[in-house]
Image: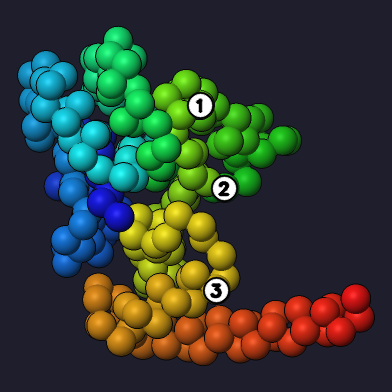
Amino acid sequence: MKTLIIVAHPDVKGSMSQQFFLSGLEQEKEVMIHQLYDSYPEGKIDMGKEIERVLSHDRIIFQFPLYWYSAPSLLKEWQDVVLSGIASNDSYMKRVAGKEFGIVVSIGVKETSYQAGGSVGLSLSELMKPYQAMATYFGLDFMPIFANYQFMYQTEQAKKQVLVDYQYYVTGPKLKTLASRTKWLRERVMGSQTLDTDLVAPLLTQLEENDDIIEDLNQTLADMS
């Protein structure tokens, strides 16, 4: 599984949350980090290069901070240029169909702001509908949104947990089940890959215990049928 993360942040180096997340992917050989603002300081997108990047990866992720309920402007420019190029070519359309598409978004306010009755008045899923529509048009599998709220106010333990969740979102299997997460964690712990083993070991134990419970329940249901 080759993953392309398109990072649209005007100041990645000055962003603690972006630096934190990206540092957790440094050992991931199948993950390409593509920083738009570093690559295109003048804002002129190279359509050919970008299309090749998209076509050569299996999972495409937009990663950005939420600016006025949307992404920074350069990501929209990327969409206008690159997606238009793909849409105008039948061969590209066939090759892009079936790829996975995800969104990693950082938000500076509380999660409760993005719900009915909250200060924003809309859910994050509603705000991200244009990206879902885009995914549908190109035949992409739209992944659940990965949202991180108020990174600066999180405890160190909470940040470590979020990092594990982020790594799983980026590198985990397409079908994200309890069993697949347990398998992924076990492989990472045994291989000591980019995970805080002190944090993950208890979590892995709990997941394995949950697996046993689910297996027992399934067996009980089978016996009753």
Q: Which residue lies furthest to the top in this view?
A: 88
Res 44 seen here: yes
Residue 191 vertical position relative to residue 34 in the rendered view, above or below: below
Q: Name the residue under label 1.
A: 136
Q: Where is residue 5 in the image (x, y as percent from the top left)?
A: 26, 44
Residue 107 vertical position relative to residue 42 in the rendered view, above or below: below
Q: Mark 3 points at which residue?
A: 179
Rendered-image quadrant of the C terminus? bottom right
Q: Residues within 10 Å of mark 1 (few under 14, many from 20)?
A: few
Q: Where is residue 216 in the image (x, y as percent from the top left)?
A: 74, 87
Secondary element under disc 3, as helix, strand or loop, is helix
Q: Earlier in the sequence, mark 3 or mark 2?
A: 2
Secondary element under disc 1, as helix, strand or loop, is helix
Q: Is residue 155 left or right of residue 206?
A: left
**Residue found at x 91% / y 80%:** 224
What is the spatial separation of the Cα atoms under label 3 and label 1, in whole angstroms? 28 Å
Residue 211 vertical position relative to residue 177 in the rendered view, above or below: below
Q: Position of residue 132 (x, y in %)?
A: 51, 29
Q: Residue 111, labelled with which disc?
A: 2
Secondary element under disc 2, as helix, strand or loop, is helix
Choose between 33 and 136: the one closer to the eye.
Answer: 136
Give the label, 3 or 2, closer to the camera: 3
Q: Which of marks 3 and 1 is nearer the N terminus?
A: 1
Q: In this view, does 218 lie to the left or right of 100?
A: right
Q: In this view, does 50 lie to the left or right of 198?
A: left
